[in-house]
Amino acid sequence: MKVLSFSSSAFVSLRYDEKTKTLTVDFTNGARYAYSNVPPEVIAELDKASSKGAMFNALIRNRYEERRLI
């Protein structure tokens, strides 16, 4: 499990499971979502982005299957 380092007003944490290609996102509003089949290249782009929220919206939101966990 890879934990992405960042500071963001939108996220509390971002974790990526390389085996299952699942990104788990804890939002500041308390919601937790899992995004399935996210390629490692997309995670690399997200990881190096200066704005994680903007990059998340551009690369992941509404592009990968999402499942609310909490």
Image (cartoon, grey):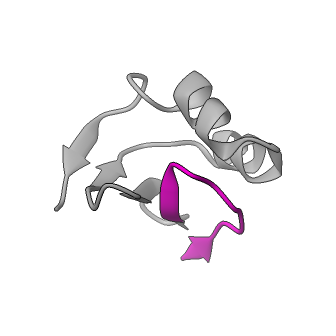
Residue at 28 percent across and 62 percent down: it is: 30
**Residue 31 image-quadrant placement:** bottom left
Residue at the spot 37% in from the left edge and 46% down from the top edge: 35
Q: Quadrant of residue 56?
A: top right
In terms of depth relative to the viewer, which is nearer, 63 or 50?
A: 50
Q: Which residues are magenta?
A: 1-13
Q: Is residue 24 left or right of residue 38?
A: left
Is 17 inside the magenta-drawn segment?
A: no
Residue 20, percent from left and from top:
42, 60
Please state if 35 lies on the left or on the right of 19 as rendered: left
User: What is the quadrant of the N terminus in the image?
Assistant: bottom right
Q: Quadrant of the C terminus?
A: bottom left
| Residue 17 percent location from the top left of the image | 49, 67
Q: Is residue 47 found left or right of 38 in the rendered image? A: right
Is the magenta region chiefly helix, strand or loop?
loop
Percent x, y for residue 27? 39, 55
